[in-house]
Amino acid sequence: MLARRLVAAVDWLSHAADTTHLPLGCFGASTGAASALIAAVERPEVVTAVVSRGGRPDLAGPSLALVHVPTLLLVGGNDAPVIELNRRAMAQMRAEVRLEIVPGATHLFEEPGTLDVVAARAAAWFGRFTSRAETAA
């Protein structure tokens, strides 16, 4: 259901007069990461990049092999189970995908400064890939 809602939001943004010309990236946290990846698969002409924070990309299932947009997976260094799930998901993806571990962070990134690290890395990733999309347009 969340993936359907995100695809609907992507569709709306891609047709709205104020945003139709802008590149679009999807950010998903926890189970929302799978929804972001599914939206990228369903709208590859619109979604230019994905960032996952403490995400469960594995929940995207067979869609993982269909992801063709650059994807950044940010996982807390103290979240071993999710690190492993992200590694397994990466192995199924064909797109440019990078796993970055945020030292000292747990699953929710509640530790001081960890969300600042996530914000900076996500901004850099989106900046890198949305700039390319904007230039190509």
Image: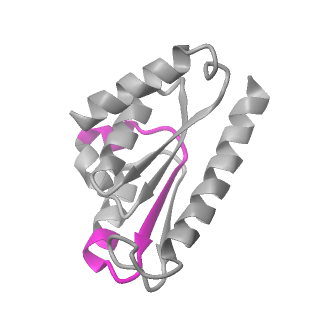
* x 41%, y 81%: residue: 77
Q: Report whether 89 appears left or right of 100.
A: left
Q: Report whether 137 appears left or right of 19.
A: right
Q: Residue 136: x and y, percent?
A: 75, 27
Q: Is residue 42 visible?
A: no
* Residue 82 on the magenta span: yes
* x 55%, y 46%: residue: 70
| Stretch of the chain drawn in magenta | 62-84
Q: Quadrant of the C terminus?
A: top right
Q: Nearer the viewer, residue 10 or 89?
A: 10
* Residue 130 on the magenta span: no
Q: In the picture shown, does residue 30 fall above or below 64?
A: below
Q: In the picture shown, does residue 25 fall above or below 123?
A: above
Colour mode? one colour
* x 46%, y 65%: residue: 74
* x 20%, y 33%: residue: 1
Q: Nearer the viewer, residue 83 or 88?
A: 83
Q: Report whether 48 appears left or right of 128.
A: left
Q: Residue 108: x and y, percent?
A: 34, 70
Numbered circles on residues, count = 0
